[in-house]
Amino acid sequence: MSRSPSIQLRQYLPHDFEALYDIDQACYEPTIAYSRREMRNYLRFPGADCIVAQWEKKLVGFIITAHEETWAYVITIDVLEAYRRHGVGTLLLRSAEEKLRSAGVRVVGLETATDNASAIAFWQKHGYRKRVVRKNYYPGGRDAFSMTKLLE
Ligand SMILES: CC(C)(COP(=O)(O)OP(=O)(O)OC[C@H]1O[C@@H](n2cnc3c(N)ncnc32)[C@H](O)[C@@H]1OP(=O)(O)O)[C@@H](O)C(=O)NCCC(=O)NCCS
């Protein structure tokens, strides 16, 4: 696989829904992956935005954010395992942050499992810092770090 020249970002379209659902199912264990209903609800959240990444026309990742005034939240970011470590997640996050910044957002928050080392490394690389541990945050009882970043 080559690097970013073959990655394209675009806005989510309703016909992407099943592909998003499949990617989320592949990225998380069954207790944590979203049901179709949850995924639909998140996409319809007030202030929600979803950007998808295509690799040679195949949908390989996406990010869903929601914002209200100066605060935003990363609902999820998912990249298919075979396409990780090629900058897809970084492109998705930068694009989402850029849109949030333009919308007046100053703080972005998220939760990530305390045992999800790759995600924690990803968030830290992008300037997110651990704030608190939220015990039993996920269905099944795993703990989460709440992380935040101030957008410059
Ligand atoms: C987290 C995730 C979105 C990252 O996507 P990605 O496309 O692999 O990210 P990038 O290639 O842009 O990685 C950027 C940097 O993050 C860090 N990083 C990403 N994955 C890492 C890993 N497995 N181990 C250590 N560092 C990692 C590295 O610093 C990396 O830079 P480098 O490759 O130059 O060393 C992806 O691993 C994923 O979808 N995981 C499953 C779903 C998930 O846990 N999402 C987060 C929920 S909060």
Image (cartoon, rainbow, N blue to C red):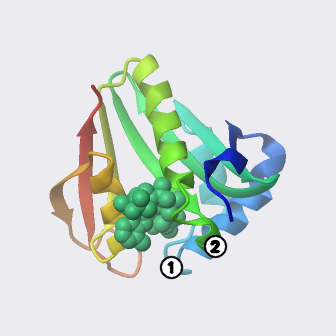
* Percent of width and height locating residue 115: 30, 77
Question: Which residue is rendered at x = 51% and y = 53% of the image?
Answer: 89
Badge 2 density bin: few <14, some 14–19, many ≥20, Cα 10 Å: few
The disc placed on residue 58 is none
Badge 1 density bin: few <14, some 14–19, many ≥20, Cα 10 Å: few
In the image, ligand 1 is in what quadrant?
bottom left
Foreground: 54 or 140?
54
Question: Which residue is rendered at x = 52% and y = 35% of the image?
Answer: 95
- Which element carries disc 1, helix, strand or loop? loop
Which residue is tagged 1?
31
Which residue is tagged 2?
82
**Quarter of the rendering containing residue 151:** top left
Disc 1 residue type? Thr
Image quarter (top left, top right, bottom left or bottom right) of the N terminus: bottom right
Q: Please identify, in this view, whether the residue under mark 1 or under mark 2 is nearer the observer.
A: 2
**Would you say 9 lies left or right of 69 here?**
right
Q: Is residue 136 above or below residue 111?
A: below
Question: Which residue is rendered at x = 33% and y = 54% of the image?
Answer: 123
Q: Earlier in the sequence, mark 1 or mark 2?
A: 1
Label 1 within 8 A of ligand 1 by Cβ: no
Res. 35 visible in picture: no
Question: Is disc 1 in contact with disc 2, using a CB cutoff of under 8 Å?
Answer: no
